[in-house]
Structure formats: structure tokens, C-alpha cells
Image (cartoon, grey):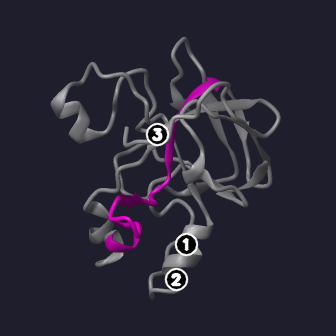
Amino acid sequence: MGGVVSAVSSNGVYSFTKPNRESITLLEGLEGLGVEGDVHAGVTVKHRSRVARDPSQPNLRQVHLIHEELFEEVRGAGFEVAAGQLGENVTTRGLDLLSLPVGTLLRLGDEAVVEVTGLRNPCPQIDNFQDGLLKQVVGRNADGSLRLRGGIMSVVVRGGAVRPGDPVKVELPDGPHVPLEIV
């Protein structure tokens, strides 16, 4: 099971969108750091709302990944979204990120490895980007349960460069698989 990196993005300042890059470098540190030069890199949480609640929380949101297929789905509802515009660092193709269990390892290219920690909780800023888009990313399943499609979050296990065209290899965790929840 695997896919491919279709784009990589980072931003050194707080902004909803992140510009695409030719490559990004993941930094591992003792507890992972994130994307070199990205405002969300660090051992402790960097998202403003989470910092306001408790700045000492571990940063389980170091690297944000989104499946490119989401952009095609929302295009069908009249929205134009491109890689990096929802704040993700890594855009993938051919991989059902949302179905992966907690603890899955994703090998990005030749060196970098991230561990999946959970789902991204899409925020109202998505509607500031394009009015009505939040309803496309957050919805309900047939059974009434919440459906979050804004990508997944991860921490860096092994650093390295990641580029568009790099393969993404999936290593599922041993034991019972724990479904993703919001982190």
C-alpha cells in the first residue's frame, strides 16, 4: 500500500495557506520537530488556539498531510483548492490517508518517516478562505457520525528531504488498529 507525494508546502509565518516548495526538510529531534522553517515546527504545540489553552502540550501536529483527491471532490461542488491552500505540508495522491490507524508510519521518499497521530480538526478559517468550503470538509456519515476530511497530522520520526514525486510507503502498526481521532 502506498502513494506518491504530489506537492510539498511550508510557511515561516502564520498564514492559512502555505506556498508550494521544490522540497521540504523534516527535522527529527528527540521528539520530532516538524518541517524546517515552518511556523508549526517544534516539540510543543504551535497552533495559536492550542497555545492559548496550554503551551506545554506536545506537538502532535508537526506535519499536516492531505490527499489531493479531496481537491477534486470539492471542485465538483464548485470550489477551487490547490496544494498548500488548506495549510498542509505534504499533499499525497493514491493513498487513503483518512483510513490509516494511529501509529502508522509513512515513509516519504528515501529518508523521511512520519508517524500518524490523528485527524486535523478543520477550523472556521476554511470558510474565510472560500465561503462554504468548511461544509465540504466536515460533514456527517450515513450513521450520523462526524466525518472530517481535512487531512491527517503526524510527528517526525526520521528527518530528511521530501519532494514532489517521492513515493509514500505505508507501514501499519502491529496489534489492534486504533482509528484516527482529532489531535
- Where does label 1 land, which residue? 71
Q: Which mark is residue 75?
A: 2
Disc 1 crowd rating (10 Å Cα; few below 14, some 14-19, many 20+) is some
The relative height of residue 138 versus residue 66 in the rendered view (above or below) is below
Percent x, y for residue 109?
A: 79, 40
Question: Residue reaching furthest top?
Answer: 30
Q: Nearer the viewer, residue 123 or 47?
A: 123
Can you tell which of label 3 and label 2 is closer to the viewer?
3
Percent x, y for residue 82?
A: 55, 70
- Per the image, label 2 sits on a secondary structure element best described as helix
Three-letter amino acid code at disc 3? Gly
Three-letter amino acid code at disc 2? Arg
Task: Look at 82% across and 34% down and name the residue there.
Answer: 110
The first of marks 1 and 3 along the sequence is 1
* CB atoms of marks 1 and 3 within 8 Å: no
Q: Is residue 102 magenta?
A: no
